[in-house]
Image (tube, grey):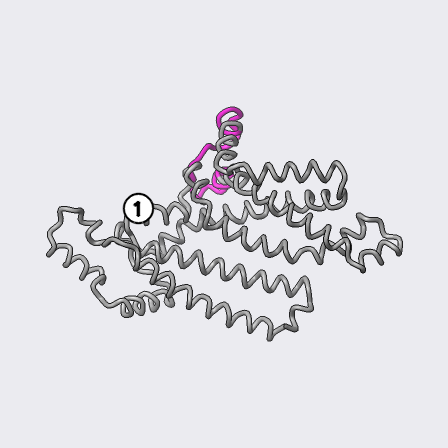
Amino acid sequence: MHRFVLRRMIVLCLSLAVASAAIFGVVELVPGDPASFMLGTGAQPETVAALRDQLGLDLPWALRYAHWLGGVLTGDLGHSFTYKTPVAGMILDRLQVSLPLALIALALSVVIALPVGLFAASRQGRAGDGVTMGITQIGISLPNFWFAMLLVLLFAVRLRLLPAGGFPGWGHPVAALKALILPSIALALPQAAILARVLRSALVETMGQDYIRTARAKGLSRGQALRRHALRNALIPVLTILGMQFSFLLAGAIIIENVFYLPGLGRLIFQAITQRDLIVVQGAVLVLVAAVILVTFLVDLAYAAVDPRLRRK
């Protein structure tokens, strides 16, 4: 197991190194000059050149990457061109919204998907299975921003139970959690529908294995064989989807953040792109990519916990 973890950690470090170079290179290839954008189209060339020198934009690509990477390794992601504040502090502030939102939405999707997937698999080919899969297909098809607006109309406007938007900060924890309930539900339901369908398919495939038939021959009911034997082996594709979903929920919630006016990481990236604040874009995207790679590493460890055979590979 130790050797398995060590190999995965080496892959983790190499992936982060390659990702940092790719992110820096791609952002540098984006057309346009941040200095010209900040000063406006009527700025004098001498003024633009002076600002480029101040921001370090006239240095060679390799030197700028080395300076940026050295700062990343020490926790310094640079200073925003627009706001003149440390990028790391801006990202941490936004993660206080995006990370809890993603975790709550992921937990909700698991809580919903597990019983739904088990129910559908236990009634394979019957009416309950068909109805459940039909409902999940609707859940996948509905745009989450449209569903979010329906939630606002019902729970915020009509029933006045939850806030329609905004985030009061974690200084008021109850109000902060209430502000995240509706966006979490809007994000969780489509993901729960996907997860339920994946779990149902994995369980149905697993139920056709020889060891399940042996368990049934020994007297276990279909439901008992499903829960005691099939569920554990069906979790590997589910864990893969969970890792992908967390990455999506963390990085791809920009539309929901705009619907509920949440100051999350997605909105920060969108604002930085529109303002040509490339140093913020680089830092925020690097954090998201690092989160994806870290989640992949944790999913690999979860694979090994679920299936001990993987530890010997």
Residue extent of the magenta highlight: 155-179
Crowd band around label 1 with a 10 angstrom C-alpha radius: few (<14), some (14–19), many (20+): few
Snapshot quadrant of residue 49: bottom left
Spot occupied by residue 264 in the image (x, y as percentages of width and height) = 42, 46
Q: Nearer the viewer, residue 283 or 174?
A: 283
Spot occupied by residue 69 in the image (x, y as percentages of width and height) = 35, 67
Answer whether residue 168 is visible to the viewer in this image.
Answer: no
The residue positioned 13% from the left and 49% from the top of the image is: 43
Left or right: 313 as drawn, with respect to 178: right
Q: Nearer the viewer, residue 160 or 36?
A: 36
For label 1, the residue is 274
Residue 270 falls within the magenta-colored stretch? no
Residue 170 falls within the magenta-colored stretch? yes
Identified by mark 1, the residue type is: Thr
The residue positioned 39% from the left and 64% from the top of the image is: 20
Element on which disc 1 rests: helix
Say if 77 sits above or below 268 in the image.
below
